[in-house]
């Protein structure tokens, strides 16, 4: 197949969505398909709605099929009606803007545009059951041909997970907590900090791993919380970490916490489980498809500081539970599809349209 893959910006951007895109492209190319990444320029949402970029830069005769990362929907929802007369268009959905925390009039606009967009494509790839449910809600059940293709966590070369976990000889206290995610409001770092402030100072250490250059106002708020609760000595900002350094980073912690207000799926939950870390996420979004409450981690309602603090305190007081949950986490990871499984599922879906 000759595949055009449309995204905003750089395919090497650090995020779970772009990682998913890269892994799928890697798999398709390994099967002999020619995949061309087409980078669209992202402006603000309203400018993108008025844009006609794709029509001017895509030669449809070069491709058998187009895949669009759903994030580009404001730039393509109009031009798709012209493009899909010439070749099939498949949308790859990581997250809907329509269900973000915004004023109602903004979400109404997102809803209107995203509905128009989803009616302009021939098929849809969704990254979780939760995302599929939102798509059905948005389209009132009138959804195009679609599949769920779960993200995977096998992003490292380490293979002997049991041996890796047996080497993990961390003292139970202080509890080493890992936050992996960009420092932006929806990832919930402020919730984690408030929860940690309810614990005894010497009982925990926190590593914050992710970009701090996206939302300066929120980063300022985070530093204010740290200062207010005198947490500086317990916290380390590592910046984003990639590649071979991440396995050791995971192994140097007891638990990973990402209390997002709406995580579409959460590849980092799987990554953490690979290295024997129980994980804590929220009941909103796709985390509940990975985390089995009380078995390999915990689920809390979004924003519930008290419950998060209670779970962390219990693990500090009962380190044996932490060990059991860590082993359960590895077992959960082993049962999960790999990127090859996901890539194969997606390729079979594409072939239906390309043929």
Image (spheres, rainbow, N blue to C red):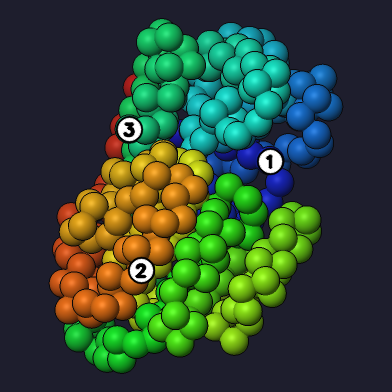
Q: Which mark is residue 129?
A: 3
Question: What residue is shown with label 1?
Answer: 8
Question: What residue is shown with label 2?
Answer: 312
Residue 85 locus on image (x, y percent)? 58, 9
Residue 310 locus on image (x, y percent)? 34, 63
Corner quadrant of residue 141: top left
> Which of the two discs, 2 and 3, sits closer to the camera?
2
Image height of 129 relative to 238, above or below: above
Residue 123 locus on image (x, y percent)? 44, 20
Q: Is residue 38 left or right of residue 258?
A: right
For the N terminus, the image quarter is top left
Q: Could you tell me which residue is drawn at 41 percent across and 39 percent down?
A: 285
**Earlier sequence position, callout 2 versus callout 3:** 3
Q: Could you tell me which residue is drawn at 41 percent across and 83 percent down?
A: 203
Q: Could you tell me which residue is drawn at 72 percent across and 56 percent down?
A: 218
Image height of 261 relative to 119, above or below: below
Q: Could you tell me which residue is drawn at 31 percent across and 91 percent down?
A: 171
Residue 158 shows up from this direction: no
State the separation of the CA atoms marked 2 and 3: 28 Å
């Amino acid at each position: 197949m000759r595949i055009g893959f449309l995204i905003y910006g750089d395919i090497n951007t650090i995020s779970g969505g772009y990682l998913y895109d890269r892994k799928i492209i890697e798999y398709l190319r390994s099967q002999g398909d020619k995949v061309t990444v087409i980078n669209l320029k992202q402006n603000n949402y309203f400018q993108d709605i008025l844009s006609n970029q794709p029509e001017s830069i895509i030669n449809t005769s070069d491709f058998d099929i187009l895949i669009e990362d759903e994030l580009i929907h404001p730039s393509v929802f109009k031009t798709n009606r012209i493009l899909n007369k010439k070749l099939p268009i498949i949308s790859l959905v990581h997250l809907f803007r329509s269900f973000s925390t915004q004023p109602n009039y903004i979400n109404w606009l997102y809803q209107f545009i995203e509905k128009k967009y989803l009616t302009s494509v021939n098929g849809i790839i969704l990254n979780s059951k939760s995302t599929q449910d939102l798509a059905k809600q948005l389209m009132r059940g009138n959804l195009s041909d679609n599949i769920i293709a779960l993200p995977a966590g096998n992003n490292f070369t380490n293979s002997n997970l049991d041996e890796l976990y047996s080497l993990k000889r961390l003292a139970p206290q202080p509890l080493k907590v890992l936050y992996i995610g960009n420092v932006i409001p929806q990832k919930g770092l402020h919730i984690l900090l408030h929860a940690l402030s309810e614990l005894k100072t010497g009982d925990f250490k926190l590593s914050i791993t992710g970009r701090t250059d996206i939302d300066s106002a929120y980063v300022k708020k985070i530093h204010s919380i740290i200062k207010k609760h005198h947490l500086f000595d317990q916290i380390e900002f590592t910046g984003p970490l990639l590649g071979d350094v991440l396995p050791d980073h995971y192994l140097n912690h007891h638990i990973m916490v990402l209390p997002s207000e709406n995580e579409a799926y959460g590849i980092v939950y799987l990554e953490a489980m690979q290295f024997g870390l129980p994980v804590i996420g929220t009941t909103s979004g796709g985390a509940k498809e990975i985390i089995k409450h009380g078995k390999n981690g915990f689920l809390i309602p979004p924003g519930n500081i008290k419950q998060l603090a209670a779970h962390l305190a219990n693990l500090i007081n009962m380190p044996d539970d932490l060990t059991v949950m860590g082993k359960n986490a590895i077992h959960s990871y082993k049962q999960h599809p790999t990127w090859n499984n996901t890539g194969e599922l997606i390729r079979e879906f594409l072939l239906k349209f390309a043929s």
